[in-house]
Amino acid sequence: MKNNMSYRDLGIGDDEYRMILDFMGREPNELELGMFSVMWSEHCGYKNSRPLLKLFPTKGEHVIQGPGENAGVIDIGDNDALVFKIESHNHPSAIEPYQGAATGVGGIVRDIFTMGARPVALLNSLRFGEPYDERVKELLAGVVAGIGDYGNCLGIPTVGGEIYFNDCYKENPLVNAMCIGLVKKDEIKRAVASRIGSPIMLVGAKTGRDGIHGATFASEELSEESTAKRPAVQVGDPFMEKLLIEACLELIKEDLIDGMQDLGAAGLVSSVAETASKEGCGVVIDVLKVPRREEGMTPYEVMLSESQERMLVIPKEGKEKRIAEIFDKWGLDAVVIGQVTDDGIFRVFEGEKEVAAVPVVALTEGCPVYVREGIKPDYYRKVQGLNEDELLSVNLTEAFKKLLASPNIASKKWVFSQYDYQVMTNTVVVPGDGDAAVLRIKGTKKGFAASTDCNSRMVYLNPYEGGMMTVCEAARNLACVGAKPLALTNCLNFGNPEKPEIYWQFKEAVKGMAKAAEFLGTPVVSGNVSLYNESSNGAVYPTPVVGMVGLLEDIENRRDMAFKNEGDIICLLGRLRRELGGSEYLYVCHGMESGRVPEVDLEEEKSLINLLLELTSLKVLSSCHDISEGGLAVALAESAIKGGIGFSVKLESLDAGILFSEAPTRAVVSLNKDNISKLKEVSSKWGIEVHVLGRTGGEEIIIAGEENEAVSLNLEEARQIWGERLQCLMK
Amino acid sequence: MRFGIVVFPGSNCDADCYYVIKDVMHEEAFYVWHKERDLSSFDAVILPGGFSYGDYLRAGAIARFSPVMSAVKEFADKGGLVIGICNGFQILLEAGLLPGAMLRNKSLKFICDQVHLKVSRTDTPFTHLFSEGEVIKIPIAHGEGNYYCDPETLESLKSNRQIIFTYSSPEGLEDEEYNPNGSIANIAGIINKKGNVLGMMPHPERCSEAVLGGTDGFKVFASMINWAKEASR
């Protein structure tokens, strides 16, 4: 093979090839070129995103480990720490939804136990086209089954997530998976501080030909040829992963290893390079020692295979034998495939023969970085000019019903009932019941909460404001269930960054997110970037998903969204707002995705969160639900449906704006009337408005204006519309 | 009371059962690796939920060949209490300790939900703290929980009063509408003729503490403990 023919096929640009020649001082061979190709892909090298990622705040009093390791780690007191990260598996899922999604879960779980933590919770964030199209339904069904089957088999509960439908995702669905692990602070493992001469062991599954060049594939736009890349999708075996988790955690318990590194994107190439680069060491690997599933594999195939359920382990001196014993008990391979050297070169041997020799730094720090120029897209100015006042006149009850039936708002039970969300017996606020999942920590009074969020329509309409809104919503969701927001991970899903309009979206969204994360004191501790989410229909909406984690000091103080008692007072915390920009109302009732995104006041958001946390410790509230898609009316309805209790509220001025605005920094709460003065007192201390709206009770949903009964619907009818919509669509 | 909790490769509710026995019931709990051959030191054995051997081939089909299963048979023959939960139930069926088989759920999908069960017998070691006909709320989480047996077996299960739990409405109506997985006769749990081996698809260990939203499962374990203590008196 002539190199000048092949490097472009591997996604390497002309300038990049010249850099490679400089590093090598000669023409690279095929394997060496393949190693550069995967290591310098966006997926592994972050070459388009690194400068922007530097904008994120990454430090804080709770942060033990920020970005740069397999996952972030935060301190939750008493020698306990939470390890978490979110990651994308978008392109594989577009081609092969079941395996793509399943291996996405497998990969993120390995990132967590690589740090020495027991994985205790999974979440996800999914985007599909509108679920009216057969192909979309197939993708949705395949992805959900893939996530479910993998996580269920591992015995890690899938406790939360979000899912939205928009035709910008029709050809390019998004599948982001998040995992949270629990670890004792003194048992945290980092990715290897290697000793010279230290052996490198490969453990877990055997290596096959699957997933070769998955990382490169993930860093291109999807096209009609993409299905031809199906072999680049890996195949998952959750049973193998379950054994791997148990075996690896035994290694840590017996203190047998210096470090671990999972094999994910770019397989052995990436994990071995990461291992060696930490200390500026070199490394030597013999591909003949790698246990294989298939015969006749070339060094190229062995090094670039993305076969799942494999890990690299760096044993403590003399512990190789004990490690092999533990793996044998679990029926897994554990072999020494190489060792750490001192010459800074990544050498690959096939027996006696050296088949590659590349400077480690060339693969890692040598990856080029592109700072691009963004251009404000044309649509941006256009959407700002929308006059919402012309779009208010509708039959409010009909509009309300349409919103309840929107797949973006309707119950997601069809999805989460396919996930085992209770295994491990820690889940105390289950999916659908609260604004975030809440899990207890056995043996303590504590618990943690987690939520994934992103309203990508808002981010599209205004990436900066939308980015802020995303972080704020995640934090608010945690506060609603009673948890103090501590830190976040993010998965930045965007289109092709080489297009200036896309780069602008990316940059603005990151700036907005960074600003809000800084202000709210919730630093970014880990994350992942997924670019090139484009198909023949164009780019997906900018979708920077936030996964946030928070702490409950006392699990007994947790809250969900369900109305609890007849006759409780219902209040709105925050301002009565009527901005309709970017709302589901405009989309569902007027077919528009447009308008000015409602502004976020970070000061006010912080105060609302503090207020909710103080109310938590005072145990004042019966229920709490943040206002998001569908606005005030839908928030009220969801609390009523969940609690099986109707309500009657009255608003002074009533129109579609008041009912359906998705303006942030607001929550609907219910409480005993005896607590109302306390609520007002604490709210006024934090400067948050309290609006008494009405009372819970009865079997009707009634929202009245001064003179008219604007919305009136039987609770059971509302439950049917909202509760059965997705299920009916998926039948 | 000493509980042995069998761990197969792929079991994943073993730790949950261990926690319930030790920290909720305050009894002694021990993990038993699937290669063990002797269970004589235990008063009761739990086969926990999960995906033993990845549920490859068929749920429980490989686990039944584990060395520990001969020990479980021996233990049961001698009258020891054995409870199989979810995958544990599937293994008991595959091993022939209970009659019948599991098919995939009628929906062909994994189902995680809360269901209601009617307790139809209270003279067993596992249910004697319930009241006759009591309806309990309990979580399920399975892909293959569609219990099936031939008509003769069903007749014999009925005439020997081996059907212990059936899926029902909150009021106790055993209607198809309340059958989450298509099980024949709404069967959620059965017992052997001798009355010392119970298999059930729902998870009592997931509803044994108020913090988890329900305590109906507590009575299953409490019944076992209480029964064993009465017996040894």
Image: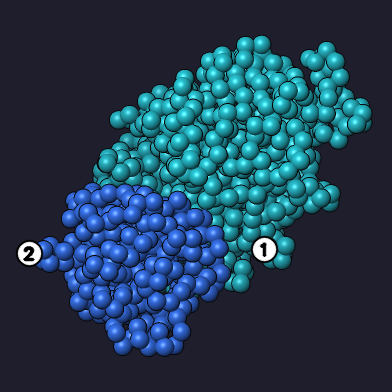
Q: Secondary structure at mark 2?
A: loop
| Of residues B183 and A328, the one drawn nearer to the viewer in this rendering | A328
What shade does chain A have?
A: cyan
Q: Is residue A317 visible?
A: yes
Crowd rating for badge 2 (residues with CA inside 10 Å; few <14, some 14–19, many 20+): few
Where residue A57 appears, as percent x and y from the top left, is: 53, 25
Crowd rating for badge 1 (residues with CA inside 10 Å; few <14, some 14–19, many 20+): some
Quarter of the image where one finds residue A693? bottom left
Q: Please state which of the two labelled residues, at mark 2 or mark 1, is closer to the viewer.
A: 2
Q: Which mark is residue B233?
A: 2
Q: Residue A447: x, y in percent?
A: 34, 42
Tell me, yes or no, whether dots 2 and 1 are on the same chain. no
Give the residue at mark 1: A137
Image quadrant where residue A561 sits: bottom left
Q: Quadrant of the N terminus of chain A?
A: top right
The amino acid on which the numbered mark 1 sits, given as a three-letter code, is: Lys
Q: Residue at x 71, y 26 (%)?
A: A351
Element on which disc 1 rests: helix
Measure the alpha-carbon separation of dots 2 and 1.
61 Å
Q: Which chain is blue?
A: B
**Mark 2 residue type:** Arg
Q: Write the residue at 62% across / 11% down.
A: A342
Please say whether residue A712 is visible from this viewpoint: no
